[in-house]
Amino acid sequence: MTKEILLTGDRPTGKLHIGHYIGSLKNRVKLQNSDKYDPYIMIADTQALTDNARNPEKIRNSLIEVALDYLAVGIDPTKSTIFVQSQIPALFELTAYYMDFVTVSRLERNPTVKAEIKQKGFGESLPVGFLNYPVSQAADITAFKATLVPVGDDQEPMLEQTREIVRTFNRLYKTDLLVEPKGYFPEKGSGRLPGLDGNAKMSKSLGNCIYLSDDAETVKKKVMSMYTDPGHIHIEDPGKVEGNMVFTYLDVFDPDKAKVAELKEEYQKGGLGDMKIKRYLNQVLENELGPIRERRMKFAEDLDSVYDMLLAGSKKANEVANQTLEEVRAAIGFNYFKD
Ligand code: TRP
């Protein structure tokens, strides 16, 4: 049976948080273990460089943290090929070719990139590489002929651009070489974990995250600081559960749905204190994060092995990407010296 190829990745600009876990890491572990797929998971250091060129040590330091986060959540290098983007030269060449199939205005219209440009406040100093990263992402995906890309919802515009590039390439060069990918997104409603402060997005720049590497004490402190219902002052007061982060997180993390329904009812009636539900949430989180943290610590004891694993993954990824590059050059007609 030929397996479906899956490719995904993350930019290493810090450690991964429980929003990443809910938004895509869990799905990757699930798909990896289904044996219908051949998964490639890429640490996108080149993409991270597009807005961190003056800060490469941040990427260098984050690379190993992201690798540890992957191993900690259960991404298994015997089932998933974990590799490093910058170590795959073919990706750069594919990117360069694909740049000829995409207009500047199309890139400027990519909603995710547009939002990021605004958020980062580049103004006149927008790096060409940053605007172009959807094109390099198309190279990442097509180099492996991936059909499935498990990512958060915000990545759909990258997949749309990839499909456009694939169609343009195949049409221009009369081939079916490149493959259109589909996204694999978290179930509706469970995909985006809001921040501790109630902001719609958990993000490092907003300082509202719980990291997979946080120790138990830190997680507890963060849970205790979570945004609940500002109108819920006395324990007896009726409280709101909508927009209350403790209940939002319980909905996501607590397998005991009946218990959550009961707690919500009690909270809305009045008589359930914030401290008490926060302690309960902390326990629920600890049940899930405790084993992840322990595995992370084990892997962190032997970083050499983690780097070896990345090297082995990158070697394998190079073979696949080089093969596709050969085919792409031939499709364009740049295979002058072949017999
Ligand atoms: N853009 C992704 C992020 O923001 C990282 C990434 C790079 C990626 N190349 C990819 C994801 C290819 C999926 C497929 O983290």
Image (tube, rainbow, N blue to C red):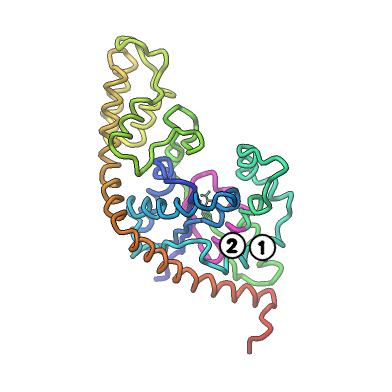
Disc 1 residue lies near ligand 1 with CB under 8 A: no
Q: Which residue is mark 2?
A: 139
Kindly report the distance in space between the C-alpha atoms of the residues bearing marks 2 and 1: 8 Å
Specify the quadrant of the image occupied by residue 309: bottom left
Number of disc labels: 2
Quadrant housing residue 238: top left
The x and y percentages for residue 326 are 59, 76
Find numbered disc 2 in the image and state the secondary structure of the residue it sits on.
helix
Residue at 70% from the left image edge and 57% from the top image edge: 102
Figure check: 206 above or below 273: below
Query: Around disc 2, counting alpha carbons within 10 Å, would you say few (fewer than 14), some (14 to 19), or many (20 or more)?
Result: many
Question: Are discs 2 and 1 less than 8 Å apart at CB?
Answer: yes
Please give left or right for residue 164 compared with residue 265 in the image: right
As for residue 158 lying within the magenta part, the answer is yes
- The local crowd at label 1, few if under 14, some if 14 to 19, many if 20 or more residues have their Cα within 10 Å, is some
Looking at marks 2 and 1 on the same chain, the residue that comes earlier in the sequence is marked by 1
The disc label shown at residue 98, or none:
1
Amino acid at dot 2: Ala
Main SS of the magenta segment?
A: helix
How far across and how far down the image is residue 301, in percent? 28, 55
For the residue pair 181 and 338, the one nearer the viewer reads as 338
What residue is shown at x 31% (from left), y 50% (from top)?
Answer: 296
Residue 164 relative to residue 201: left or right: right
x 36%, y 30%: residue = 222
Query: Residue 184 at x, y = what percent?
Result: 47, 51
Q: The C terminus lies in which quarter of the figure?
A: bottom right
Q: Which residues are magenta?
A: 136-161
Q: Is mark 2 within 8 Å of ligand 1?
A: no
Taking the magenta stretch, the answer to whether it contains residue 124 is: no
* Residue 4 locus on image (x, y percent): 45, 64
For badge 1, the amino acid type reads Tyr
Above/below status of 280 relative to 67: above
